[in-house]
Each structure stands twice: as structure tokens, then as C-alpha cells.
Image (cartoon, rainbow, N blue to C red):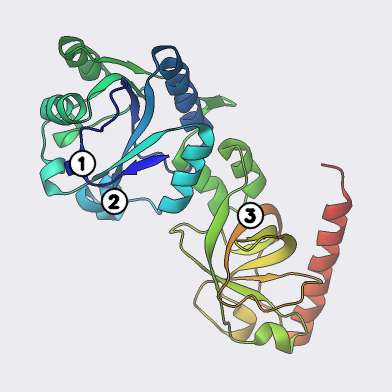
Amino acid sequence: MRVVRDLATLPLRDSRPVVATLGNFDGIHLGHQAIMQQLLAAAEPCGGDPTVITFHPHPLRLIAPERAPRLMLTGEQKEARLEALGIETLIVIPFDRELANTPAESFMRELLHEKIRVTRLFVGPDYRFGRGRAGDVALLSKLGASLGMSAEGIEPVMDGGVRVSASLIRQRLARGEVREAARLLGREFSLVGTIVHGEGRGSELLFPTANLAPENQFLPGRGVYVTRTRLDGGGDYLGVTNVGIRPTFGYRRIVVETFLPGFEGDLYGERSELDFLERIRDERRFDSPQALKEQIARDLQFLDRWCSEPR
């Protein structure tokens, strides 16, 4: 997949029609995937370039920082998800004050039409853009027709009468509902990062842990989970992960620590991706390290039972 971050390199060398979608696409959930499917289906018969246009940072980081969401995906994860779906070009537009103050009509005419040369555009039905969020699907369709650019809104994906959205999935994850979130995402929620040294408490309990320094902004709710650790160097390992502050030892900083039963080796400095598969329990404070040790043993029994269940 070609990734364009410098708008000075536009227009692209490729002379194919640009069939595009526009948005933030955090999570690349089922609703986003439906848009990508329409995009790919439209690009194929005309030999078009299926293109995703997105922004960095998220526009709310600049416009209303207090309302800006913590993103579920890192940039690297988003690129990998889009490439796996078949997207051929990703254009990342730097979002700054100048762009925030650009009228919707100018954004369409100068950027989408003249610079990127979009011939067909797909967006979600409620998508808004331009200064004051004045642009919508109706404007895209009306002005697009005069520019020779067709634009249409894609109906949202519904789940039990509720629209699938990134905010809905964040709510599920905040409650620890990782299986429900995975259903709406179309895959497990995952964190990426590097394994770092911890406080050594796991070794004291005879349950050594791998501590992940996540690069993702958003973390699932505090609790204990069944997870899959996938190492960059190869190998997948099921384990038990605690996301929390380790209240038994009086800490206050959120950590992500995973016990990998049966694993032997040095993981420090390794990059890994951690998939959240099932919630086991809430995080809680224990009266003693021994009581915590006994609970960890029960958590590992849960993992054994979980692994033996048919999927």
C-alpha cells in the first residue's frame, strides 16, 4: 500500500481514477469495512485506485481537545488493517489551523478535486467536514456534480438497532466487554508496544510477567483477561493479562502485564501485539501477596478451561 503524508507530492503519479473515502476510521470496525467494500467494488470495474483519505492528528485534538477520543489504533495498525482490506493508497492529511478554517467548498474544490483528483467519493451518512463542520453528504453530492466528482453516503451498519461506531466500541472496551468489542470490530482488540522491565513483583510471586509499554492511546477497562501475545519475531502465546494499577502493592500507574505459562526466554525489548480474547474478572486489592498468588493460580485454571472449550 502506498502511504502519502506530504501533500506536496500530490497529484499522484498514478493516472487511474481515484475512488476514495474520507474519514478518521479509528478501529476499522464493521461500519468502516462496509465503506471499504463499496469503495473496492466501485474501483474494480473502472480500474480505479481505491484510496483512503484521513487526518493526523484527529481533528478534535486541535478543535476541542477535551472531546478528542483516545484512539484504539496506532498509525501502524491502521495502515496494516487497511492494506489487508485491499486499499492501495492511504493519504494522511496533516490537520492544522489552516485546514480547520478551510470552508467546506474550498476543501472539496482545491484538495479533493484539484489536488487529489477524486472521481468518486464514499462517506458515512453523517460525515461532516470543513470550517464549522458545514460540509455534509448533500454538499458533497451537489458540488461534486459540478466538478465531475460523484459522492454518496453509505448507510451505517446496525447491530441490534444500534449503529456500529468507534465510540460504541470504546464504551464496550471500557467495561471490559472484549468479546462484544471484537464482534463489532470484526477481530480482537489489540495493543502494540515493546516489552519492558517491570517492578519484579511477578517473579516474587513465582509468576513472572511480561510488561507491555503500549503505544495505543486507548486501553480496555481495568481487569484480568485471556490474551494472545504475538511476537514480531514469530510465535503466538496464550496468557493471562492484568490491566490495572496493582492495588495490592499500592501502585497508581496503569500497567499491562501478562503471564505466559510455560514460556521460557528473555522478551525484554521485543515488540509484540496483545490480543484481548476474554475477560476473566475485575482487578481488585488482595489482603496479602499470598492471596494474590492464589488468585493468579485460579486465573490460570480459567485459562486452561477456556483453551479446552470448542471455538
Rendered position, 174 above or below 161: below
Instruction: Estimate how packed mark 3 is, as few (under 14), some (14 to 19) or many (20 or more) residues with alpha carbons within 10 Å.
Output: many
What residue is drawn where x is 45% and y is 25%? 35
Name which of mark 1 and mark 2 comes first in the sequence.
Answer: 1
Of the 4 image quadrants, the one containing the N terminus is top left
What residue is drawn where x is 31% and y is 50%? 67
- Amino acid carrying label 2: it is Pro
Residue 244 versus residue 266: which sits nearer the camera? 266
Name which of mark 1 and mark 3 comes first in the sequence.
Answer: 1
Judged left or right of residue 87, residue 122 is: left
Residue labelled with disc 3: 275
Rendered position, 278 above or below 296: above
Judged left or right of residue 148, residue 55 is: right
Image coordinates for residue 161, horizontal then vertical, percent? 55, 24
Report the mark closest to the observer, 1 or 3: 1
Of the 4 image quadrants, the one containing the C terminus is top right
What residue is drawn where x is 20% and y is 12%? 148
Residue 104 versus residue 281: which sits nearer the camera? 104
What residue is drawn where x is 22% and y is 24%? 117
Residue labelled with disc 1: 9
Judged left or right of residue 253, residue 6 is: left
Report the mark closest to the observer, 1 or 2: 1
Q: Quadrant of residue 111?
A: top left
Helix or strand or loop: what does disc 1 sit on? helix
Is residue 288 something that shows in the picture?
no
Image coordinates for residue 171, horizontal then vertical, percent? 51, 47
Residue labelled with disc 2: 57
Residue 193 versus residue 171: which sits nearer the camera? 193
Q: Quadrant of residue 99?
A: top left
Residue 162 versus residue 23: which sits nearer the camera? 23
- Amino acid carrying label 3: it is Asp
